[in-house]
Amino acid sequence: MSHLPYWGRAEIAERLGVHRSKAYRLTLRPDFPEPAARLSTGDVWRIDAVENWAAEHWSPDGPPSP
């Protein structure tokens, strides 16, 4: 993926193995980390924050836990 410490929704989708529209919906969940920055091209999240969230809330074998 990227060498920068940030991911956009496309990278989040790739990491979680979901379509970009699903990644968009996931990033709107109240338990998803806040974006590190809101750019004109879209929001970006710290990779470590997304990875920590995924470890606690995401299962590739089923839907994300609430």
Image (tube, helix red, strand yellow):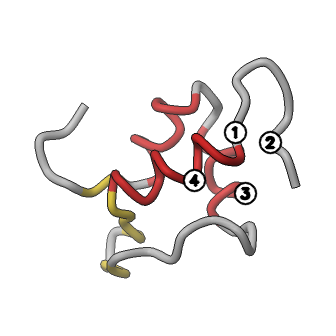
- Amino acid at pointer 1: Trp
Look at discs 3 and 1 and give the one toward the viewer.
1
The structure residue drawn at horizontal position 64% and vertical position 30%, both measured from the top left corner, is 18
Could you say which is closer to the camera, residue 24 or residue 51? 51
Q: Amino acid at mark 4?
A: Trp
Residue that numbered label 3 is attached to: 25
Q: Which residue is mark 1?
A: 58
Task: From this view, report whether residue 59 is shown above or below residue 7.
Answer: above
Distance, label 2 to label 1, CA atoms, is 5 Å
Name the residue carrying label 4.
53
Q: Are marks 4 and 1 in contact (CB under 8 Å)?
A: yes
Of labels 2 and 3, the one closer to you: 2
Question: Which residue is depicted at the point 11% across and 41% down?
Answer: 3
Q: Is residue 32 above or below residue 18?
A: below
Identify the residue position indicated by label 2 in the image: 64
Q: Tell me the distance, in whole angstroms, between the alpha carbons under discs 3 and 4.
A: 14 Å
**Element class at badge 3:** helix
Q: Amino acid at mark 3?
A: Arg
Question: Label 2: few (<14), some or many (≥20) within 10 Å?
Answer: few
Mark 4 → mark 2, Cα distance in angstroms: 10 Å
| Residue type (three-letter) at the residue carrying disc 2 | Pro
Q: Is residue 7 above or below residue 12?
A: below
How far apart in space, not on screen, are marks 4 and 1 (Cα)? 7 Å
**Neighbour class for label 4 at 10 Å: few (<14), some, many (≥20)?**
some
Say whether disc 4 or disc 2 marks the residue closer to the N-terminus. 4
